[in-house]
Image: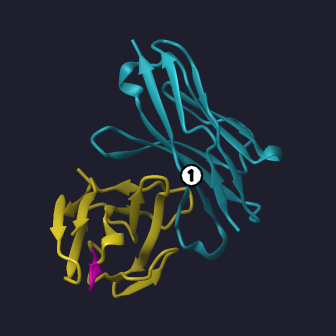
Amino acid sequence: AQKVTQTQTSISVMEKTTVTMDCVYETRDSSYFLFWYKQTASGEIVFLIRQDSYKKENATEGHYSLNFQKPKSSIGLIITATQIEDSAVYFCAMREITGNTGKLIFGLGTTLQVQP
Amino acid sequence: EAAVTQSPRSKVAVTGGKVTLSCHQTNNHDYMYWYRQDTGHGLRLIHYSYVADSTEKGDIPDGYKASRPSQENFSLILELASLSQTAVYFCASSDAWGRSDYTFGSGTRLLVI
């Protein structure tokens, strides 16, 4: 069965440092897509970055990048030069190709606190 | 600007009453979804739809019905609201492509008393 696990409940870092958030997933599909979303204090959920399972290169988007380790079923989110505004809850999610339901399976989230 | 709009933003409902949550998207997306968010449970899929006039059960459909009268509109219906349905509800839309990300609405905070 498909499952997404984020083991870090919360992380606190100092501003301008680099943080990595972990995510592991379970799937039987050979092709799938992995996503990271950010939920701000206001409750808004926004898409950050995506990794296609068939791509070996790690995705990057601004100061977000991914550490994709397919043999370990792991997709870490790396935020460099963190800012106060990065304080939020970060969700990892997976979509399988099989069935083409389009649905995402989410992890429970990691709360990031960036300290000044 | 393409968007997903949910209404109402918040609602207080009485146990046993009927509640309808509405969602409207201007993204021209085929897929629409309803999730609920609870502390400790993350986001869980209730119902989804990939075409008008058709809905599918998600992972936690019990106690909920859904309606998709048009491509743009997707409603979540609680026929007999219960205390356990107190949560934040999110609507989202996406393209049919597997790599397409979700666009989320702002959420509806529902309190059942």
Q: Position of residue B81 (x, y in %)?
A: 27, 79
Q: Position of residue B26 (x, y in %)?
A: 25, 62
Quarter holding the C terminus of chain A? top left
Callout 1: few (<14), some (14-19), or many (20+) C-alpha neighbours within 10 Å?
many
Determine the image quadrant of residue A66. Answer: top right
At a point 56% along the width and 62% down the height, the residue shown is: B98
Q: Residue furthest right?
A: A71
By secondary structure, the bulk of the magenta-drawn segment is best described as strand
What segment is highlighted magenta in the picture? B74-81
Quarter holding the N terminus of chain A? bottom right
Q: Which residue is mark 1?
A: A107
Q: Position of residue B32 (x, y in %)?
A: 38, 69
At a point 40% along the width and 80% down the height, the residue shown is: B51
Asked if residue B80 is among those painted magenta in the image, a careful observer would answer yes
Q: In the rendered view, does B57 fall on the left or right side of A66?
A: left
Q: Colour of chain A?
A: cyan
Taking depth in this image into account, of A57 and B54 the one nearest to the observer is B54
At a point 44% along the width and 26% down the height, the residue shown is: A113
Chain letter for the part of the structure drawn in yellow: B
